[in-house]
């Protein structure tokens, strides 16, 4: 199943205060229904890459549901999935879909109604670097893989110079920084390296960094801090968190492409659903080997994961209301304004709505 071309839409940044306007109910997410005012607390945990977007979502949601508190702990994707499976939170945020063993455990928690995985946050993963005097940096897939395997150790290496003709590259030692925690961003980054440079990156994609060496940092904030702290450092993080760090252009075909919301959306447009999943499990296989200069291949699709049936009716209503807001145009625009991500397409919104409409209580 290929995504609609409507994915590659222009960002329309609306103020959070507009979230109560239009035909979408914040309580249910279904057009034309009256809003039901809810109260209670909703707890989620997971991907730190979603943190800025989550702030936009919770602020906008509170304007239409002021008596609902949404807590989100950015412990990392692996931690979020673990807490959800254990029943510690109502939903998880994850930059990677559930693995097969996790899917089985999640279905055990949620029961016969099954689980949902909704791709509600799309963003480019930026390769960030700290190299004073080098404001523009091109990295081909094999060079990027060589840096992170430790085969390329200085910034004036001939392989880097070949990607950056005429650039004045220093002899500074390269310090590759990877995530120390189980991270969906790492999963997506290693998936890219494995697909785009299989002769250099020979490790299997994984949320836990598979190699020794380099520097390790916890969560997105730790990654950014580590790269900021060390001249010559390079790492990978959600583009929205790059700040003042340098951001590399990545080799795509014969071009070098900078990360952007539009280019991230474009590559997902040409991706397909994973096979063999449940009715409301919308996990995607990302096209990492695109050769189109309009697409950026190091992209994460971050999911919200939850149960179709909850034991408690109040929690079911809260999950349904919050995610209905998250996928709405207002919710996606609030996240884009806060995080700079790419709003989901109308086709993804309609797809996710089928799962949200199905959320119910078994009590």
Image (spheres, grey):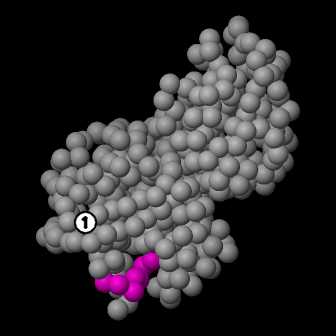
The image quadrant of residue 37 is bottom left
Residue 257 seen in the current view: no
Q: Residue at x 75, y 47 (%)?
A: 194
Query: Pointer 1: what residue?
Result: 68
Q: Position of residue 85 (x, y in %)?
A: 55, 75
Q: Position of residue 248 (x, y in %)?
A: 61, 27
170 lies left or right of 255: right
The image quadrant of residue 254 is top right
Q: Residue at x 63, y 24 (%)?
A: 130
Q: Is residue 168 above or below residue 55?
A: above
Q: Is residue 358 above or below residue 285?
A: below
Residue at the bottom extreme? Answer: 363
124 lies left or right of 15: right
Q: Residue at x 46, y 71 (%)?
A: 89
Q: Position of residue 253 (x, y in %)?
A: 68, 32
Using a 10 Å C-alpha cutoff, classify the residue at mark 1 as few (fewer than 14 neighbours), some (14 to 19) or many (20 or more): some
- Tally of numbered discs: 1
Q: Residue at x 34, y 58 (%)?
A: 327
Residue 43 seen in the current view: yes
Q: Is residue 278 above or below residue 273?
A: below
Looking at the rendered image, the quarter that the C terminus falls into is bottom left
In the depicted view, which residue is nearer to us: 272 or 130?
130
The image quadrant of residue 205 is bottom right
323 lies left or right of 129: left
Q: Secondary structure at mark 1?
A: strand
**Residue 129 part of the magenta segment:** no
In the depicted view, which residue is nearer to us: 261 or 19?
19
Q: Which residues are magenta?
A: 306-313
In the depicted view, which residue is nearer to us: 148 or 254?
148
């Amino acid at each position: 199943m290929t995504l609609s071309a409507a994915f590659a839409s222009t960002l329309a940044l609306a103020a959070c205060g507009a979230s109560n306007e239009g035909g979408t109910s914040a309580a249910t997410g279904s057009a034309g229904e009256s809003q039901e005012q809810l109260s209670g607390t909703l707890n989620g945990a997971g991907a730190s890459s979603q943190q800025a977007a989550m702030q936009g979502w919770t602020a906008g949601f509170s304007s239409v549901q002021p008596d609902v508190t949404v807590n989100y702990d950015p412990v990392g994707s692996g931690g979020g999935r673990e807490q959800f499976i254990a029943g510690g939170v109502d939903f998880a945020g994850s930059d990677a879909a559930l693995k097969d063993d996790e899917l089985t455990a999640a279905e055990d928690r949620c029961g016969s109604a099954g689980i949902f995985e909704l791709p509600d946050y799309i963003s480019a993963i930026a390769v960030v670097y700290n190299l004073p005097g080098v404001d523009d940096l091109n990295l081909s897939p094999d060079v990027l893989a060589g840096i992170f395997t430790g085969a390329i150790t200085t910034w004036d290496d001939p392989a880097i110079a070949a990607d950056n003709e005429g650039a004045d590259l220093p002899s500074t030692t390269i310090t590759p920084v990877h995530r120390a925690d189980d991270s969906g961003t790492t999963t997506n980054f290693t998936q890219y390296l494995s697909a785009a440079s299989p002769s250099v990156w020979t490790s299997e994609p994984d949320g836990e960094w598979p190699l020794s060496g380099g520097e390790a940092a916890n969560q997105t904030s730790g990654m950014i801090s580590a790269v900021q702290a060390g001249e010559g450092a390079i790492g990978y993080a959600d583009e929205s968190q790059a700040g003042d760090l340098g951001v590399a252009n990545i080799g795509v075909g014969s071009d070098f492409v900078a990360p952007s919301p539009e280019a991230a959306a474009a590559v997902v447009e040409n991706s397909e659903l994973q096979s063999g999943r449940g009715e409301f499990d919308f996990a995607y296989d990302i096209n990492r080997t695109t050769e189109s200069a309009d697409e950026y291949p190091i992209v994460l699709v971050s999911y919200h994961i939850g149960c179709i049936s909850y034991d408690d009716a109040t929690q079911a209503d809260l999950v349904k209301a919050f995610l209905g807001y998250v996928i709405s145009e207002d919710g996606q625009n609030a996240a884009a304004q806060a995080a700079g991500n790419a709003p989901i397409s109308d086709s993804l919104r309609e797809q996710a709505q089928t799962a949200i409409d199905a959320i119910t209580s078994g009590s």
